[in-house]
Image (tube, rainbow, N blue to C red):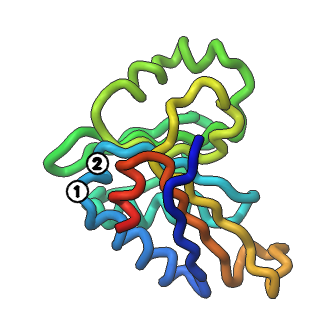
Amino acid sequence: MTILETRSLPWPDEAACAATAQRLAAHPALRRAFIELHGPLGAGKTTFTRHLLQALGVTGRIKSPTYAVMEQYPLPGGPAISHFDFYRFEDPQEFEDAGFRDVFGAPGLKIAEWPERAEGLLPPADLRIDIAFDDIDDGEDGGGPRRVRLAAQTPLGVELLS
């Protein structure tokens, strides 16, 4: 996919992660976007998703879909948010059997962690977010600052970065 525009951000702490999520949630176009989250284990993909969903008005427990592969959350005043975690995804047939193609074809925000594990099955992402441990942190404890790169891959992605 072609990268149309990028932004790089420091996340010195979780508050910076939450602030990025809040800014992104302020865009009405987000409700129809597909976002891919990339990064190593413990980088903060699920934490970012939790902050984003809360900023959109989702209440209650927001959990990682690592074992279920997908969790859906009703979005106040709009279609559901579908949060995928393909970390344990192994069989492409599971994508079809679980109805994920229909989910991606329906309205609503889609967020995918570990999308590379479902490569070739997913539509092009509007926004790719890469989260990396900052060089000053060894990443061992999962804490510390992060570097984040947001890459718009569609016109909708460019709109989200504006």
In the figure, is residue 128 to the left or right of 139?
left
Looking at the image, is 103 positioned above or below residue 18? above
In the figure, is residue 129 to the left or right of 158?
right
> Could you tell me which residue is drawn at 32 percent across and 66 percent down?
55
In x, y percent, where is residue 109? 35, 44
Q: Residues within 10 Å of mark 2 (few under 14, many from 20)?
A: some
Residue lying furthest left in this view?
77
Find the distance from the CA under tag 1 to the CA under tag 2: 6 Å
Q: Residues within 10 Å of mark 1 (few under 14, many from 20)?
A: few
135 or 70, which lies in front?
Answer: 135
In x, y percent, where is residue 32? 30, 43
153 or 112, which lies in front?
Answer: 153
Quarter residue 141 falls in: bottom right
Q: On residue 28, which mark appears?
A: 1
SS for tag 2? helix
Quadrant in which the N terminus appears: top right
In the figure, is residue 153 to the left or right of 109?
right
Amino acid type assigned to the residue bearing label 1 in the image: Pro
Q: On residue 31, which mark appears?
A: 2
> Could you tell me which residue is drawn at 51 percent across and 75 percent down?
17
In x, y percent, where is residue 113? 60, 47
SS for tag 1? helix
Q: Do the residues labelled 1 and 2 touch (CB within 8 Å)?
A: yes
Quadrant in which the C terminus appears: bottom left
Amino acid type assigned to the residue bearing label 2 in the image: Arg
